[in-house]
Image: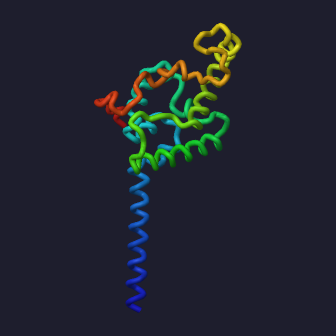
Amino acid sequence: MIANKVLVGSTVVAFAAAIGLFVYVLNISKAFSYLTSDSKTCINCHVMNTQYAAWQHSSHASVAGCTDCHLPQDGVVSKYIAKAKDGFNHGVAFTFNNYANAIKISDDGARRVQDNCVLCHSSLASVVTANSDINHRYDGKTDRRCFECHKEVPHGNVRGLSTAPYNLGVLK
């Protein structure tokens, strides 16, 4: 009888500790912020401070947030699938510290950014495509991405963690 009470008591304590640890991890990781479209979410990890600071001073800051460019715009389901996939990949990379100093966009991410460039700038994109034979930067290639020529939009010319060593991002 006493052994059962001890077992039940220790089980309750272990369960409460697990719940407490789970709530702590949710809080410390700012897990619920990833369900929003707030651009400040992108600087939950310090490695994005440089990109965030450059975006804040760009022409896009007043019209487009991080999710407007980096996530699909064709529906909520595809947006959250991309968020989950990117979040998992970022979590693994940051946890195991196996990412390059100069962060590069994935092929899937680059495709999403290109699609969103064309979505927002469709009239300009159609003019550039129509005039590709006279546009020396476009060179008539149909597979070029907007950011091949416009690399500085909206993250500036910075490409590494050490390019803005005193940038602390935004105080939350």
Q: Residue 129 sits in which quadrant?
A: top right
- The colour scheme used to paint the residues is rainbow
Residue 67: x %, y % from top left: 54, 34
Residue 17 position by quadrant: bottom left
Residue 162 to residue 24: above or below: above
Count of picture labels: 0
Residue 158 in the figure: left or right of residue 122: left
**Viewer can see residue 139:** yes
Image quadrant of residue 106? top right
Vertical relation: 37 (above or below) 3: above
Residue 16 locus on image (x, y percent): 41, 68
Q: Is residue 83 left or right of residue 130?
A: left
Residue at position x 62%, y 19% from top?
A: 121
Q: Who's the residue at 66% across and 38% down the image?
A: 75
Between residues 154 and 145, which one lies in front from this camera angle?
Answer: 145
Q: Residue at x 52, y 40 (%)?
A: 36
Split into 4 quadrants, where in the image is the C terminus? Answer: top left
Q: Residue furthest top?
A: 134
Identified at 42% across, 87% down, the residue is 4
- Is 148 in front, or is 42? 148
Give residue 20's position: percent from left, percent from top.
Answer: 40, 62
Residue 133: x, y in percent?
Answer: 68, 10
Which residue is farthest left? 166
Which residue appears farthest toward the right when viewing the image?
130
Q: Is residue 64 above or below residue 127?
A: below
Q: Quadrant of the N terminus?
A: bottom left
Residue 170 visible in image: no
